[in-house]
Image (cartoon, rainbow, N blue to C red):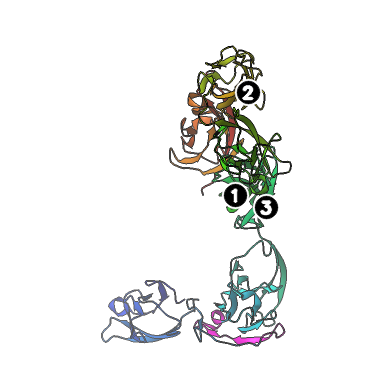
Amino acid sequence: MEDAEVGSLMHHFVAIDGDLGENGVVSYVILAGNKKGFFTIEEKTGLLFLSAPLDYETQRFHRLTVRAVDHGLPSLSSTQTLTVEVGDVNDQSPVFSQSIYNATVAENRDPGEPVIRVSATDKDSEENAVVWYSLLPGPGYELFSINPYTGLITTTSYLDREQQQHFTLRVQARDSSTRPLTGEDYRGCFTINSHTGVISTTQVLDREERQNYTLIIQARDYGPTPLNSSTQLQLVLLDQNDNIPSFTRKSYHASISEGLPAGAEVLHVSAFDPDEGSNGDVTYSLTEDSSQGAFSVDSLTGVIRTTRSLDRESRAQYTLRAVATDGCTQGPLSSVASVTIQVEDVNDNVPVCDQNPINAWVSMRTLPNQIITTVTATDGDQGENGTIQFMLSDEENLFDINSDTGEISLRRRVRAGFSGRKLQVVVSDQGRPALTSTCLFFIHLKGEHEGLQFTNKVYNATIKENSRVGTWIAKVEASDQTNSRQRVTYTIFSGNEDHIFSINRHTGEIRLQKDNSLDFEINPQIHLVVLADNGLQTAHCRVSISLLDINDNAPVFEYNNYKTAVWEGQAHNTYIMQVFASDADSGMNRQIEYSILAGNHNEAFILDSVRGILATNALLDREITPSYKLVLQAVDRGNPPLSSITTIRIQVVDVN
């Protein structure tokens, strides 16, 4: 064979001489046919060796003339001719007659329309030089087929020039060491070695495109009348996790009304994975969620829900990233889709006067229709829900208010004896139903002595948020220095809409009258407006009540459970993920420490107690422990401390 190694024994020449002694000793020498020195012969033994590589394609036959000569005087000799035939080895690749072929074909022709014939030759021997053709996968290759024997390319479907004008096909030529298999047209996906019977693929197979193949294999002998038989090979492709879960959309958009209770459904995300078994099982999660845990997703259904009531005035839009992950245990694949959630407005904000109470002054010279002050108010809602109108609560013949601007004007001049006026302005939005609040408006006569006055303009008080009924808040006091005999009565005008506080109308003592009515986290400071009235005049003051926080809120994790994966064999202290918990309390009551309560077998993981970062603490081995379920705790520093827990499922991914 042409691939015989240099130094291989090729032949053994033997010559017999009947003489005795030196007359019978024979030596061997090559006389002719070895100009290029392919062979050497041992002079004494007649062993012929290969001294240079042979090449079937360059020279197929070598005719050597060898002489055997004895050592007598005179010497006698004889010659022999040896023909060395070089056997072919399949060491030559087929070569196309052209590296690039150009062809044209008319559109809308029936399938089977000839396109072009390609041709390749092989310099090996006849058996090894038979060439088979196939199309390699590429854009549009499924629209064409090639005859594996002749190289003729034809169409397999109707072509449309307006959809695609150019196609680039890649043709593979293989010699007869491998032959195409017969059976259904699988576009030359398989070949068989004609000598060994080894079946191999010619291109990458895709289970999602076709899972089953039926191949017909024929065996044939080389007798004068060749006989053959055939069999069928049923081939089933096994799944490989080669498909990423695909969302039905790249981005999702939804809207939801503010104020709905926790658990309200927002939208449904969906992804599909064509792989088989666990490779095609999709689970959902949210990542890079800047909503502070306002939403959760069902890991199996993809339904996104709220975890708390939303407030449009605090935040009108959320952008989330939904992740779809398959269930492969050896390197799961995932994809991401953006989710935008718009919070729709509802009429949940009462209009609030920018200043309350309001003071204004008039004189005998103030002209009718002159604007003496303007009431302003704000409403956090949108549209009609945030459009404000003003009106006076009682029938009034001296003053007017513009319902749109809040401008208060004098209808006519004030007369002698005018001692001031107290008006209530009703501020309402245009929602359905409308929400309203009331502003207090004091009108004084310029130069008039202020008779009734509180001892302080502002009274400050501090109480704990868990104070009980009857807790003393403050005592307000008002008097008229010019007329101390007049009886003064006290009322709370605003800030007590939920009737949390009571005031003794005679002494001015303010106390708490409802249990569990104060909450530092909702409203840490309360402002009351208190009125004093002596029958002739009305005065007002403010009472500012500051609440002291108590540890009444446990830390809350962003999610009730987490799911993540880590490659086995990672170095010590490899980052895995970070968990977050928040506490609505303040000060030390909201400072959080993290710890692992359970599931940390062999201390495989460590958790940063301050930052919540989870990392490896040992080399993980999937074959020993394929997954972990950790129970984490977040505890605050209140007295007594409060805590909550979450779980993390960690899949250890195999490394081959």
Tell which residue pokes out farthest to the left in this image.
73
The image shows residue 611 at horizontal and vertical percentages of 46, 34
Q: CA distance from mark 3 to mark 2?
A: 56 Å
Position above or below: 296 against 484? below
How far separated are the C-alphas under marks 2 and 1?
A: 54 Å
Q: Hey, what amino acid is under mark 2?
A: Ile
351 versus 226 height, above or below: above
Q: Amino acid at mark 1?
A: Val
Q: Which residue is at the front of the view, 364 or 550? A: 364
Image vertical order of residue 532 relative to residue 114, above or below: above
- Which residue is outermost to the right? 433
> Mark 3 = which residue?
270
- Residue for badge 2: 492
Q: Is residue 30 left or right of residue 169?
A: left
Residue displayed at 58% across by 52% down: 334
Disc on the earlier residue, 3 or 1: 3
What amino acid is found at the position of numbered circle 3 in the picture? Answer: Ser
Q: Badge 2: how crowded within 10 Å, few (<14), some, or many (20+)?
A: many
Q: CA distance from mark 3 to mark 1?
A: 10 Å
The answer to whether residue 1 is visible is: yes
Q: Quadrant of residue 378?
A: top right
Q: Few, some or many C-alpha atoms within 10 Å of disc 1 (few <14, some 14-19, many ≥20)?
A: many
> Can you give x and y, in whole percent of width and height, for residue 606 in the image?
47, 32
Magenta highlight range: 107-129
